[in-house]
Image: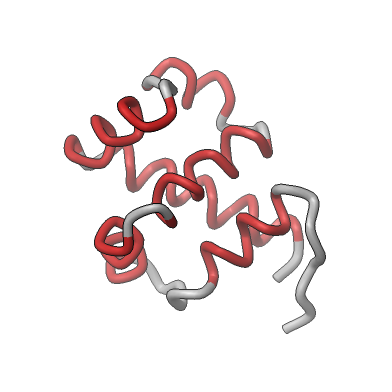
Amino acid sequence: MNKEAAETLAIRAIAHIVGDDELLQGLVAQTGMGLDDLRAGIGSNEVQAGALEFLLSHEPFLMRFVDDSDYAPEDPARAHIILSGGPIWQD
């Protein structure tokens, strides 16, 4: 996974969170980021990583995203590492 793929996954994750009231309320409660913060920071790796960290913090939330997308369960964790400045995987 490269940085562009990680950013795409994160943006899809943010859209998934915003489209689910339970997830959006959980994100606000856990991170303090609201809908306006997500809109303003959607291009920011910090906001993208924060959204992924939220999904990764609760396996049912993560699996809900994975089940609704074409991503493997480990892909959000890989994307989070890349967006946080970690290594880039060569698939």
Please name the residue shown 52% across and 63% down the image: 76
Q: How is the image coloured?
A: secondary structure
Front residue of 20 and 62: 62
Q: Is residue 59 left or right of residue 20?
A: right
Please name the residue shown 79% across and 58% down the image: 86
Q: Is residue 29 left or right of residue 4?
A: left
Seen as rendered, the residue at the extreme bottom is 91
Seen as rendered, the residue at the extreme left is 22
Q: Position of residue 7 (x, y in %)?
A: 64, 50
Quarter holding the C terminus?
bottom right
Please name the residue shown 43% across and 56% down the image: 56
Q: Position of residue 71 (x, y in %)?
A: 45, 72
Is residue 75 positioned above or below 17 on the image? below
- Quarter where residue 36 is shown: top left
Q: Position of residue 65 (x, y in %)?
A: 33, 60
Is residue 32 positioned above or below 18 on the image? above
Q: Is residue 13 left or right of residue 86?
A: left
Please name the residue shown 70% across and 50% down the image: 83
Q: Is residue 58 left or right of residue 42?
A: left
Q: Position of residue 73 (x, y in %)?
A: 43, 75
Quarter holding the N terminus?
bottom right
Instruction: Report the label total.
Output: 0
Is residue 2 positioned above or below 11 on the image? below
